[in-house]
């Protein structure tokens, strides 16, 4: 019997994932020469781009010689059966992403030509499909041949891009930017290929839009159907918990344009709002359709996914850039998202969710999908919806001078953008749409005239499409935009590298009057041992070796890299010459280099999150490394946290205390409660000298309403004057460490932060009395109790196979803390605990 709802959703599609094979052919600009039966076809376990396929077949690796995938022509072949169905059923063949110059044939008939990897295609193949023995062929032409053709020169160059003519082609820059992405250009099918049987009810593309009016949530729904389909009724239903609300949809009459649709609007009184997780609950409602066909006895349910209700307002008055969600200003913090696998651009739902959980647990409430990457799939947006993470969505344009005056290019872009907007429109997490990454900034920095900085592509075309399709989400033309030049820190948004690549002192984070950093704090962050083992040369590789440097981020043509940036701050913070230290004690150098970038990041975020700060958001350049090495990521390529991740995690929590050096005004504490509930808290500030001598202590109870912050002078808690910041320098320092601890009224610690006055660097000694005892919870989980007699700095663990829930934290004298260590599976437990201000580590004892 024919399924009347065939094609009613992705779960009814047949994904064509298995039984593919690929074949390489010489690059040929002429008409295609179909590979012969004697060609060297390689079987694939699963459909994926060429580099991923060859990696799986062990014919190529990122650790081996660079391969020019854009210089080769590749063919994909699939044989499949398609048993016929009776009734009014069409066969639709879908291609969700073909990178980049592709032609497709089915049973010898050419179906389509594609020149945009970001455009999806659907083809009705009802008249071509056979019951058995279908052959699908896809040819991917060599992009290098097209790049070599003469075209109009750009008005400026983008140094990060090796070939400037990439601006003419709608493809990702990943794999095509030596110096910061692995050399694995994406060629081939990077999204699903599928076959779908569509019956008389075609509801493959319903539209859901939400809005909030007062306390009422409104859903508008449009369901396309074939004009002469016998449907008795269509009902939209939303459920959350035990609450269900339904409303009928109707087919309009008298308007020929609407006859192929069912339309309707559902209202929910006292709607529960979707919030970023830092500020409330990300409430979602399950949406579904109930369809009754004429003559049928039962409704047919169709899942439409989840929707959320929220308002987002962007305030740009006076050069500001501030997002409010549901009327509450939100300090947006997080990182730029990177694909979990830059070779295939594919990952499963569980892995994506785990990566978003990692961001949420770090206190992040925004992830940016930058124009240098690729559009993410539904798994990413579903995870951000569920976990309360805002998404800053760039369109896939970056740095280059795009040909906005070319009609064919603009037609392709318009289709791409319309498709992407319609795809992400239902997701509550999407908070901002951005035209590009750094195009205006690159033009200005290269010296292009002012009238070339902006383009009608971003200021008019994309702006119009966003207003038309997603009017409830703000649009911003470029990631660096506003002010007298695009990357002016104190006006609009910018890529902020004052603290970072431009080697400005840490207080530039404040003095720059940064308003919003769409990317910032880029350093070559050294990962843990497991990632270093995966580098070419393994643990024997040293920072100055060629294998290490081949994976250190850098700009093409620059005489420095981001290892040099890290070393600049290592010397500034710790008063140690990094070159001499690396020469004499490489392990000590690596230990300090790991933590210094975390110190810089935590210090910067403390400045930006002060109640008096004008900054309303900052996103670290990368959440995750693209490959094993000292990359920009806060976590390594396998997702293991680096030292800087833990520093950032403590600095970004929504309930927090932070400290700032206000010079001759003293040390100030900033107490933040972004949560939706008021909190009754206790703040304690202690001052310590010589590692374990308490010289001052003070406490104060605080009532913190929801979504508020306040600042207290540190000396308000003491009964006498102390030069806590060592600003006056009358004699020796009165203390060497200040600890601010936030607790609830039951004494439970909620947050803690440290401040080290003066410029003495790390006060290292023989030992600090550090000890740790492990209680094995099961064969892959241990609970550690860590104790110290003296101040312990950057406490971390060396337990092979286990990952700590927290580390690289400081400990006050005579204190203890508990940390969970977990392995991926059953694993023997043995290891040490270390502090960077102690030359002696301690073996972790296992409790009997």
Image (cartoon, rainbow, N blue to C red):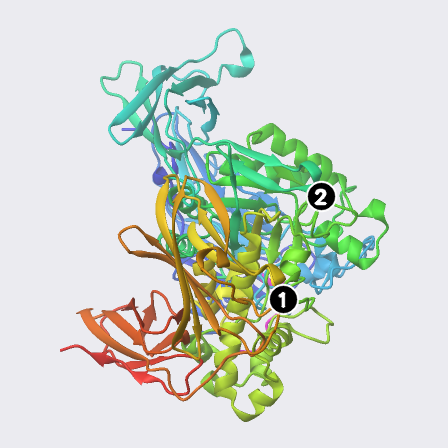
| Residue occupied by mark 2 | 409
Most foreground residue, 508 or 264:
508
Q: Is residue 536 magenta?
A: no
**Neighbour tally class for label 2: few under 14, some 14-19, many 20 plus, Cα within 10 Å:** some
- Going from N to C along the chain, the mark reached first, 2 or 1, is 1
The residue that label 1 is drawn on is 26
Q: Eyeballing the image, is 195 above or below 687?
A: above
Tell me residue 630's x, y (percent): 53, 73
Instruction: Give the farthest residue toward the top.
Output: 254
* x and y percentages locating residue 217 in the rendered image: 42, 24
Q: Is residue 643 above or below residue 352?
A: below
Label 2 vs label 1, nearer the camera: 2
Along the line of sight, the residue nearer the viewer: 780 or 650: 650
Residue 546: percent from the left, percent from the top?
Answer: 60, 83
Q: Quadrant of the C terminus?
A: bottom left
The residue drawn where x is 38% and y is 70% is 812
| Residue 778 visible (yes or no) | no
Circle 1 SS class:
loop
The residue positioned 76% from the left and 51% from the top of the image is 401
Which residue is located at x 75 percent, y 55 percent? 442
Closest to the observer: 361 or 301? 361
Which quadrant of the structure image shows residue 265? top left
Q: Quadrant of the N terminus?
A: top left
- Give the answer, above or below, for where 568 lies relative to 284: below
Q: Which residues are magenta?
A: 63-73
Q: Is residue 70 magenta?
A: yes
Quarter location, residue 719: bottom left
């Amino acid at each position: 019997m024919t399924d009347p709802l065939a094609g009613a959703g992705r779960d009814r599609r047949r994904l064509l994932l298995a039984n593919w094979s690929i074949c390489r052919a010489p690059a040929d600009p002429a008409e295609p020469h179909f590979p012969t039966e004697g060609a060297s076809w390689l079987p694939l376990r699963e459909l994926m781009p060429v580099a991923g396929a060859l990696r799986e077949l062990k014919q190529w690796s990122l650790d081996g010689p660079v391969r020019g995938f854009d210089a080769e022509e590749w063919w994909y072949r699939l044989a499949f059966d398609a048993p016929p169905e009776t009734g009014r059923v069409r066969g639709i063949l879908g291609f969700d992403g073909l990178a980049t110059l592709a032609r497709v044939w089915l049973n010898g008939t050419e179906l389509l030509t594609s020149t945009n990897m970001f455009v999806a295609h659907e083809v009705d193949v009802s008249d071509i499909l056979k019951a058995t023995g279908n052959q699908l062929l896809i040819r991917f032409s060599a992009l290098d041949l097209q790049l070599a053709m003469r075209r109009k020169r750009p008005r400026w160059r983008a140094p990060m891009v090796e070939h400037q003519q990439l601006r003419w082609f709608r493809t990702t820059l990943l794999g095509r930017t030596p110096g910061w992405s692995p050399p694995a250009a994406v060629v081939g099918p990077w999204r699903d290929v599928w076959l779908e049987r569509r019956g008389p009810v075609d509801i493959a593309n319903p539209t859901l839009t939400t809005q909030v009016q007062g306390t009422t949530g409104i859903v508008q729904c449009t369901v396309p159907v074939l004009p002469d389909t016998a449907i008795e009724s269509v009902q939209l239903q939303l459920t959350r918990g035990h609450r269900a609300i339904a409303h009928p949809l109707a087919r309009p009459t008298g308007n020929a344009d609407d006859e192929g649709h069912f339309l309707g609007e559902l209202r929910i009184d006292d709607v529960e709002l979707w919030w970023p997780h830092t500020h409330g609950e990300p409430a979602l409602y399950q949406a579904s359709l109930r369809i009754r066909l004429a003559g049928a006895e039962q409704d047919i349910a169709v899942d439409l996914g989840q929707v959320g209700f929220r308002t987002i307002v962007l305030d740009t008055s006076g050069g500001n850039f501030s997002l409010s969600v549901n009327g509450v200003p939100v300090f947006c913090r997080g990182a730029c998202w990177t694909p979990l696998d830059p070779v295939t651009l594919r990952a499963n739902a569980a892995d994506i969710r785990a990566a978003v959980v990692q961001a949420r647990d770090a206190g992040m409430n925004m992830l940016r999908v930058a124009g240098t990457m690729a559009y993410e799939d539904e798994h990413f947006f579903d995870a951000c919806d569920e976990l309360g993470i805002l998404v800053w969505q760039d369109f896939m344009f970056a740095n280059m001078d795009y040909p906005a005056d070319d009609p064919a290019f603009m037609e392709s872009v318009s289709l791409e953008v319309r498709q992407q907007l319609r795809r992400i429109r239902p997701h509550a997490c999407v908070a901002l749409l951005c035209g590009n990454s750094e195009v205006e900034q690159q033009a200005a920095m290269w010296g292009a005239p002012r009238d070339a900085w902006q383009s009608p592509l971003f200021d008019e075309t994309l702006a119009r499409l966003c207003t038309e399709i997603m009017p409830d989400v703000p649009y911003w033309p470029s990631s660096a935009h506003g002010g007298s030049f695009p990357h002016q820190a104190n006006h609009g948004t910018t890529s902020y590298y004052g603290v970072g690549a431009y080697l400005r002192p840490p207080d530039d984070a404040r003095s720059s009057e940064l308003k919003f950093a769409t990317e910032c704090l880029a350093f070559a962050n050294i990962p843990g041992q497991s990632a270093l083992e995966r580098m070419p040369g393994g643990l024997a590789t040293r920072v100055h070796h060629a294998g290490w440097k081949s994976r250190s981020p850098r700009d093409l043509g620059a005489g420095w890299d981001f290892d040099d940036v890290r070393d600049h701050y290592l010397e500034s913070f710790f008063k140690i010459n990094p070159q001499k230290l690396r020469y004499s004690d490489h392990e000590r150098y690596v230990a300090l280099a790991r933590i210094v970038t975390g110190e810089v990041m935590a210090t910067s975020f403390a400045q930006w999150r002060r109640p008096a700060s004008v900054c309303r958001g900052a996103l670290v350049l990368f959440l995750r490394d693209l490959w094993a090495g000292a990359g920009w990521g806060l976590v390594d390529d396998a997702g293991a946290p680096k030292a800087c991740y833990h520093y950032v995690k403590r600095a970004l929590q929504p309930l927090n205390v932070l400290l700032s050096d206000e010079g001759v005004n003293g040390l100030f504490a900033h107490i933040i409660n972004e949560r939706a509930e008021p909190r009754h808290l206790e703040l304690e500030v202690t001052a310590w000298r010589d590692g374990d001598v308490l010289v001052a202590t003070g406490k104060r109870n605080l009532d913190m309403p929801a979504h508020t912050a306040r600042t207290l002078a540190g000396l308000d808690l003491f009964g006498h004057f102390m030069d806590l910041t060592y600003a006056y320098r009358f004699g020796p320092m009165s203390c060497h460490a200040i600890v601010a601890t936030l607790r609830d009224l039951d004494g439970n610690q909620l947050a803690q932060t440290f401040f080290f006055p003066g410029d003495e660097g790390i006060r290292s000694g023989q030992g600090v009395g550090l000890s740790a005892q492990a209680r094995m919870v099961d064969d892959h989980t241990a609970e550690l109790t860590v104790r110290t007699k003296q101040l312990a700095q950057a406490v971390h663990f060396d337990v092979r196979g286990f990952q700590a829930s927290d580390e690289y934290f400081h400990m006050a004298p005579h204190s203890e803390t508990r940390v969970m260590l977990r392995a991926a599976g059953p694993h023997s437990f043995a290891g040490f605990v270390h502090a960077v201000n102690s030359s002696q580590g301690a073996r972790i004892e296992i409790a009997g």
